[in-house]
Image (cartoon, coloured by chain):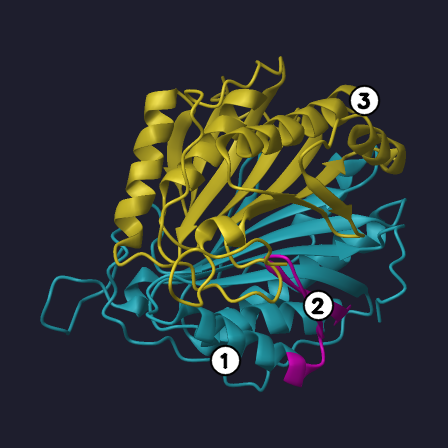
Chain colours: A yellow, B cyan
Amino acid sequence: MVTGSRTHDDSRPTATELGVGARLSLYPMTDDFVAVILGALAGVDETGLQVVTDDVSTYIGASTTPDTVTEMGRYITAVVKGAAETTSTGHVVAILLLSRGCPGEVSCESDGVPLPPPDSGPMGLQPAGVVAAAHWSVYPLDSSDHMGAIDQAVLQAQRQGTFTRGEHYVTRLDGDLSEVITTIITGWLGAGPGHVTSHATISVGSPTDTGESV
Amino acid sequence: MVTGSRTHDDSRPTATELGVGARLSLYPMTDDFVAVILGALAGVDETGLQVVTDDVSTYIGASTTPDTVTEMGRYITAVVKGAAETTSTGHVVAILLLSRGCPGEVSCESDGVPLPPPDSGPMGLQPAGVVAAAHWSVYPLDSSDHMGAIDQAVLQAQRQGTFTRGEHYVTRLDGDLSEVITTIITGWLGAGPGHVTSHATISVGSPTDTGESV
């Protein structure tokens, strides 16, 4: 799980060695859900990522270079967009878990060096042409001021135009699917250093109209 | 949001005043998903809980008494069981977010007093008769040793017999739906004091057979 030589002088892996990754689940609300999920996953290039699917979710492992993190965002966006466009009822939900550090059984003790943010501001994902709503949470687990770090992520969402409002335990985001995923990933990346996770429920085409979606 | 008189001598709300709660989303993989979701939510007694549904999820607010937390577990189990039993394809996923403290815009600064665990060991939920698999994460946000607190929650899952294995970023649980939900809720309650959240993806009837489900 941990590869590469270590150049620092203690035994803890660097944040880069711990890597980053995601778990993605797709829920197309249709009788034909198996074909939609398999088609969406098969239709997207996995180059540079480690993709493993089981019966609950798909693991997407990535290195910590800005290019690879952007590639992970592009992959997630393309899979959800593909499912949304092939679901007969139009309603698809994606569940996304992002984690920096702590894969599998590896110790979580990083050296505290923050990961580099993606350098294409922000991320440069192409618009998906799919409107999405999300409930989003960020968890800075090593932080002495986790609420301050969460506030910074929410302020960034406001600057990016995807913030709708705070809800109990989550932030409501609305926008183009690419914009929503950009907010989720860049907010998570910025909430370090250390072990930071993020969860999002991303909903496309819900028949429940709140009148507040963009 | 914060009610009741405070008897301690500073301005921070107690953990009890901050309360606990959940966000629950149901994803029945069927064309008829709207009727399944509405039927499952309508068929369960909400007494003692605050239940609010929007287009992404259902908020379930509870007080911190053991009885009310057990009631929340009973409600969640009954809703997921109801959806599983009325979905024509048999495949339903529930997404569960649990949080102790930090509702809405209320400050997260509790007085650090741990919430009482449920006193019916453990919880006393009736078997659901529905087999479930879950990916589960616990996030102790105020802890100086969050990985130690997570390890304790995983050990408890092993004692309860629902632990299957560690995966990247999550713990895999299998068992009767009631047993899986008991592990998720009691593991979350035990990972305090302070602000603790937990996320679980609970899958019933996935057509993907890993050969490892119970």
* Residue B53 locus on image (x, y percent): 55, 42
Q: Amino acid at mark 3?
A: Thr
Q: CA distance from mark 3 to mark 1?
A: 45 Å
Q: Mark 1 belongs to which subunit?
A: B
Can you tell which of label 2 and label 1 is closer to the viewer? Answer: 2
Q: Residue at x 43, y 22 (%)?
A: A122
The percent coordinates of residue B62 (x first, y second) are 44, 62
As drawn, is B3 to the left or to the right of B159? left
Q: Chain of mark 2?
A: B
Q: CA distance from mark 2 to mark 3?
A: 31 Å
**Residue B81 lies within the magenta run:** no
Image coordinates for residue B127, horizontal then vertical, percent = 76, 75
Residue B192 picture quarter: bottom left
Can you tell which mark lies on residue B35?
none
Report the chain holding disc 3: A
Pointer 1: what residue? Answer: B118
In space, the residues marked 2 and 1 are separated at their CA atoms by 21 Å
Q: Quadrant of residue A81?
A: top right
- SS at mark 2 in the image: strand
Give the side of residue B192 with respect to residue B170, left or right: left
Which residue is found at the position 45% from the left and 45% from the top? A137
Q: Which residues are magenta?
A: B158-175
Q: Earlier in the sequence, mark 2 or mark 1?
A: 1
- Badge 3 is on which residue? A86
Task: Read off the residue under disc 2.
Answer: B173
